[in-house]
Amino acid sequence: MPHRSLHAGAVLLLLILKEQPSSPAPLNGFNWTYSGPDGEKSWPKNYPSCGGLMQSPIDLHGDILQYNASLVPLEFQGYNVSANEQFTLINDGHSVKLELPAGLHIQGLPSRYSAKQLHLHWGNQNDPHGSEHIVGGKHFAAELHIVHYNSDLYPSDIIASNKSGGLAVLAVLIEMGSFNPSYDKIFSHLQHVKYKDQKVHIPGFSIEELLPERPAEYYRYHGSLTTPPCHPTVIWTVFRNTVQVSRQQLLALETALYFTRENDPAPREMVNNFRGVQKFDERRVYISFQQEQDLTYAGLSLGIVLSGALAGVLGVCVILAVSIWLVRRKKSKKGGDNKGVIYKPAFKKETEAHA
Ligand SMILES: *[C@@H]1O[C@H](CO)[C@@H](O)[C@H](O)[C@H]1NC(C)=O
Ligand SMILES: *[C@@H]1O[C@H](CO)[C@@H](O)[C@H](O)[C@H]1NC(C)=O
Ligand SMILES: *[C@@H]1O[C@H](CO)[C@@H](O)[C@H](O)[C@H]1NC(C)=O
Ligand SMILES: *[C@@H]1O[C@H](CO)[C@@H](O)[C@H](O)[C@H]1NC(C)=O
């Protein structure tokens, strides 16, 4: 009897193992999340690049920034999509994603980069600080990524995604502030994509409206996708200036969506879908703009130089004074021979104090 059930168990196990490949596995092969056991610390187990070099996002801070005059303004061609065309808005289980039609591309990088999709990263209503890139340690409320691939060299974003320089992402830092009618062209449809794999068609609009003022001012560095498989193939352009969305708009983003499918018995709210900042190692961030801060730095360094000089002068004075005093004392000592009498008690006192 026990033998037979063991046998049946083995057969069942074999059947299960055999069935496994045909079960609907996610496209990436593995599930990954932003929290819990499949959170970002576990990503490298299934996606080795996530634990590798050149990872994103990063903290854009003073020490690593370098002005580079060759960073020209980018041009955003075909971004003004007519309302007669349609975009597809999708909840992909990690973010809300807008698929972009062929024809949008960036001019100004060594190759032409064609847009594929845009998506957002955000925090939660109690801690609305969900940008991926941070600036001088400061988080912003949310972040928009417009993902492009090198369409001169590769036929698709999938093929380009693991090639050096295969991808170019534009990143917009989003702050809480005034109502933003352009972002509302996305946010007003969130209720239709609450759950994973839900889609809705929305009217076209100008994607350029989603960019901040003076887009010629940006940070540029080489990094990675901020989600698995974390390929280190992304030319990042993080705009220096932020855009604002209202408190209500941000709240809509933070509360409308779920990571899970509609009938999932354990629904998970789509919040805090941002990756933590990564080590920066030997890399450099080029900036296309001269920082006003440079003036402060210049002022500061002038101050340091001046106080250094002052300290030097004071030091010389002290040394001179001491030398003069020593010389004078030596002269006076030659007059009276009373060394031992003066020093012995003083020395004794000091040893007592330290005991
Ligand atoms: C991923 O999650 C789905 C449901 O959430 C599950 O059916 C599937 O087995 C998981 N896949 C892996 C590889 O863990
Ligand atoms: C400026 O950036 C270009 C690439 O955009 C790079 O080739 C060059 O080395 C950089 N210049 C300096 C001084 O770092
Ligand atoms: C986009 O195109 C429409 C119609 O051609 C025009 O009215 C609008 O001003 C354009 N928007 C931008 C941002 O260029
Ligand atoms: C990119 O991915 C493809 C398919 O997974 C693989 O065959 C190829 O070797 C990869 N290329 C690089 C440069 O990693």
Image (spheres, helix red, strand yellow):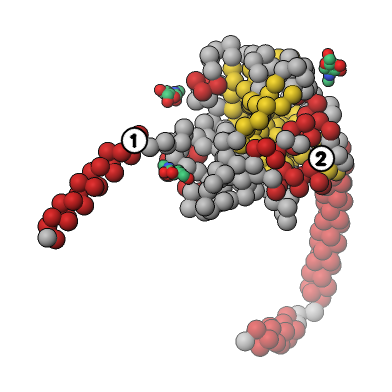
Q: Residue at x 47, y 42 (%)?
A: 31
Category of crowding for the residue at label 1, using alpha-carbon neighbours closer than 10 angstroms: few (below 14), some (14–19), many (at least 20)? few
298 sits left or right of 160 in the view: right
300 sits left or right of 84 in the view: right
Of marks 1 and 2, the one in the foreground: 1
* Label 1 secondary element: helix
Which of the labelled discs sits on residue 245, or is there none? Answer: 2
State the image coordinates of residue 151 (x, y, percent, origin top left): 59, 14
Specify the quadrant that holds the N terminus: bottom left
Q: Amino acid at mark 1?
A: Pro
Q: Residue at x 73, y 50 (%)?
A: 128
Do callouts 1 and 2 mark residues in contact (Cβ within 8 Å)?
no
State the image coordinates of residue 153 (x, y, percent, origin top left): 55, 12
Location of residue 285 (image quadrant): top right
Q: Is residue 42 visible to us here?
A: yes
101 sits left or right of 28 in the view: right
State the image coordinates of residue 344 (x, y, percent, origin top left): 69, 85
Q: Residue at x 73, y 52 (%)?
A: 125
* Label 2 secondary element: strand
Which of the labelled discs sits on residue 227, or is there none? Answer: none
Q: Residue at x 71, y 14 (%)?
A: 107
Q: Is residue 60 visible to us here?
A: no
Q: Amino acid at mark 2?
A: Val
Return the residue found at the far top.
Answer: 152
Q: As displayed, is residue 150 above or below residue 234?
A: above
Q: Quadrant of ligand 3?
A: top right
User: Considering depth in this image, is 180 or 185 the residue closer to the camera?
Assistant: 185
State the image coordinates of residue 267 (x, y, percent, origin top left): 57, 51
Which of the labelled discs sits on residue 21, or is there none? Answer: 1
Q: Earlier in the sequence, mark 1 or mark 2?
A: 1
